[in-house]
Amino acid sequence: MTNNPVKIVETVLRDGHQSLTATRMRITDMLPVLEQLDDMGYYALEAWGGATFDACLRFLNEDPWERLRTLRKHLQKTPIQMLLRGQNVLGYNHYADDVVREFVHRSVDNGVSIIRIFDALNDTRNLECAMRAAKEAGAHVQGCIVYTISPYHKDSDFVKLGQELVQMGADSICIKDMAGLLRPYAAEKLIRSLKAEINIPIDLHTHFTSGMGDMTYLKAIEAGVDIIDTALSPFAASTSQPCTESIVATLEGSERDTGLQLTKLHDLADYFKTVKTNLAKDFNLNTNIPIDPKVLTFQIPGGMLSNLLNQMKEMGVADKYPQLLEEMPRVRAELGYPPLVTPTSQIVGSMSVLNVALGRYKMIPREVKDLILGKYGRTPAPVDPGIKRLAIGDAKQIDHRPADDIQPQMDKLRQQLANEGYPNASTEDVLSYALFPEVALNFFKNNR
Ligand code: CO
């Protein structure tokens, strides 16, 4: 039994506002309290990556790289942590190795110290390039186990994956439970299994979506988890992380006391309460998101359900919504039980909507075919043979690392950007353009 302090990663600057206010927190909302956050004694501040990069360029007219440099200037003591989607970087496609490498190096050079890297399919071949680059750049590399539930995901599989990540050079392991599916006693068992076999720190990242997050953390803490991710109360609970202050209070005086001062956290929480009110007003957001234990049955995060319902409304089939709830788990099984996280969640979601609206597999989008072809990596279980034949006929699934098929892209992107009128674009701008071409060009038009 460990009796070290539990280390806290504060997520208010990334996952907290991504989960509850559509990633709309601006750097100007953060600036007044950055020094206060820095003085708190957090293990790390998750502040970059995930959807923040896209949101900066698309909605906030902010240069994400400039935001990172500003954060670094004001956060002198606490490591800045980012979330990276392996070969997908922060976009939605696979990119060439040179893009991945350059992106990781530029992230570290501009201020990131800890890089959390995941792949939606837990295919470690999609993590190789990013992990190696992060090591070279001198970052702390956190490899992810994306948590999901299926007949093909046992604790022993997650332990094996954890061991593989250690061999690949991970400095710590994160269990990424993006939909709050990890139940308290399952967490206790999983953490114990991992701690028995793995000697680097284990971080648990959950969401409160199903209403179990606090209990899951407590059982994980009792089982010896080293690090947990929490958000200050205004940006905690519902589809975000469990609340920082509540966890700190829970552990106060125990052998795993976090050492964080509750009164100082209250001051920060007061500040962020105002920020949340302002964001709701400025961006017309509904921030009253209830917990949704149904996620345990359907495995679909709440935010995603509302997106799918909108898609169905647009197609005029909103009345078939109850069928969609049945269809999603079925499609997920047929497609080889991918964990539902960007981008596989969108792929399974869209296929399910089409099946319900038009008939099963009457129309099969490109992304579904690519998933079946192996272009996103290995699915945890084989794809249903009947569906495979329908989708790709006799085409052969690839069995090599998907990015091996992608030619280097950086030079070409630089050239394209020059043709668009930006011959002296910085490497950072080329990377923004690589990930979100139209959005980035629009941003450059207004700001360069
Ligand atoms: Co998350």
Image: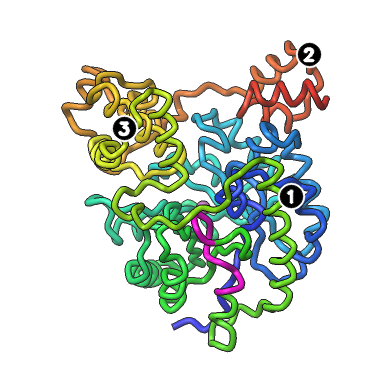
- Which kind of residue does numbered mark 3 sit on? Asp
Q: Residue at x 35, y 60 (%)?
A: 159
Nearer to us: label 2 or label 1: 2
Residue 319 circle label: 3
Give coordinates of residue 318: x percent, y percent. Answer: 35, 31
Give coordinates of residue 67: x percent, y percent. Answer: 76, 44
CA gap between label 2 and label 3 equals 49 Å
Q: Residue at x 66, y 59 (%)?
A: 45
State left or right for residue 79 relative to residue 255.
Answer: right
Q: Residue at x 23, y 39 (%)?
A: 330
Residue placed under numbered mark 2 in the picture:
421
Residue placed under numbered mark 1 in the picture:
111
Q: Nearer the viewer, residue 10 or 18?
A: 18
- Secondary structure at numbered mark 1: loop
Magenta range:
237-246
Q: Is residue 310 visible?
A: yes
